[in-house]
Image (cartoon, grey):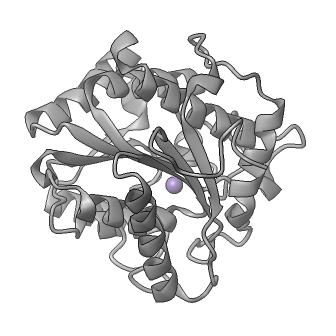
């Protein structure tokens, strides 16, 4: 099963390349099965209509779905290298592609962001936007420095990432050690409650944060738990007070208009915790295809 009508192979016209990382070893949840999310999110696309909400046929988008990366659950270093090699290989087939990763737990974003960032030549114009209920800013978590609870910290540790080009949005479940690091390092994040100021205001805060640093190109990482658990129950850490689908949709639309999105991911969907109607998988598939539609139609938004 492919994502909507994606082809299998990358060619010169391919704009987006979807791949799955079926890896949830580094979650701290007792109920993890986000490793099956890539397959389950693809599966629901057979029941979703083939137009974007703004009326663009999905068949007009040039998407290749190259399947899942082969993962050995507990072999962390090996997986990081495998992911790196896999993504490099995608660019060798077509250097202009926009990679789209479906996780897996949030740690899957780290090797993905690192590989894409390392290969991106305009480092001064590169920023990372993370949507998450959590800061994921622990220095270490139970299995060490690599964990889904340390992912934002590991991204921050990259040479070219700092507190002026990394922004975390939608937070509402931050632990004391994370808060202390965020305060001492002056890490910027927008709490979910700040949405009380209105979605336009909230979106403007995100845009102006990156504008201030002259960021032109963004990588976006979406942890599904940034959304309200009332619409996204299928995830390991369901925290109240999350964004609505429409709020996230609106933010993604505005961001796509203002910046070049050079890659994105959607992580932490746990299909075993989803409702029988697969609403969280539907939500994930919709977010991915809507964001693709915004990137394709950037000049019409
Ligand atoms: Mn999270």
Quadrant containing the C terminus in the rendered view: top left
Q: Residue at x 9, y 34 (%)?
A: 212
The number of discs equals 0
Nearest to the observer: residue 222 or residue 69: 69
Q: Quadrant of residue 228?
A: top right
Left or right side of 245 for 278: right
Q: Residue furthest front?
A: 12
Question: As drawn, is 171 to the left or to the right of 139?
Answer: right
Asked whether the viewer can see residue 71, the reply is yes
- Give residue 28's position: percent from left, percent from top: 59, 73
Identify the image quadrant of residue 102. Answer: bottom right
Tell me: residue 89, above or below residue 279: below
Q: x and y percent of residue 129 in the render? A: 33, 45
Residue 244 visible in rendering: no
**Residue at the image position 21 percent from the left and 54 percent from the top:** 187
Q: Answer with left or right where residue 181 lies relative to residue 174.
A: left
Direction right: furthest residue: 276
Picture coordinates of residue 36, whole percent (x, y): 74, 62
Give me the residue at 38% from left, 82% from top. Answer: 145
Could you tell whether 18 is left or right of 164 in the image? right
Q: Position of residue 281 (x, y in %)?
A: 73, 43
Does residue 273 lie above or below 32 as drawn? above
């Amino acid at each position: 099963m492919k994502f909507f009508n994606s082809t299998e192979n990358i060619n010169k016209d391919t704009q987006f390349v979807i791949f799955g990382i079926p890896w949830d070893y580094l979650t701290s949840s007792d109920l993890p099965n986000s490793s099956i999310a890539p397959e389950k999110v693809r599966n629901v696309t057979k029941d979703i209509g083939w137009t974007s909400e703004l009326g663009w046929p999905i068949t007009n988008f040039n998407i290749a779905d190259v399947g899942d990366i082969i993962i050995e659950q507990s072999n962390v270093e090996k997986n990081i290298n495998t992911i790196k090699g896999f993504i490099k290989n995608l660019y060798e087939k077509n250097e202009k592609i926009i990679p789209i990763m479906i996780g897996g737990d949030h740690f899957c974003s780290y090797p993905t962001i690192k590989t894409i960032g390392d290969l991106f030549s305009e480092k001064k114009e590169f920023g990372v936007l993370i949507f998450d209920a959590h800061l994921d800013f622990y220095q270490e978590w139970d299995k060490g420095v690599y964990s889904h609870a340390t992912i934002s910290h590991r991204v921050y540790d990259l040479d070219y990432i700092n507190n002026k080009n990394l922004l975390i949005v939608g937070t509402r479940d931050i632990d004391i050690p994370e808060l202390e690091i965020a305060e001492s390092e002056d890490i910027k994040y927008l709490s979910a409650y700040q949405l009380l100021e209105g979605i336009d205001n909230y979106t403007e805060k995100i845009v102006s944060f990156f504008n201030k640093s002259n960021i032109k190109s963004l990588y976006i990482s979406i942890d599904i738990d940034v959304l309200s658990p009332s619409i996204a129950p299928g995830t390991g850490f369901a925290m109240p007070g999350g964004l609505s689908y429409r709020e996230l949709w609106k933010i993604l639309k505005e961001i796509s208009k203002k910046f070049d999105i050079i890659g994105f991911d959607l992580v932490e969907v746990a299909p075993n915790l989803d409702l029988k109607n697969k609403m969280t998988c539907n939500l994930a598939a919709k977010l991915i295809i809507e964001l693709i539609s915004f990137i394709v139609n950037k000049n019409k938004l």
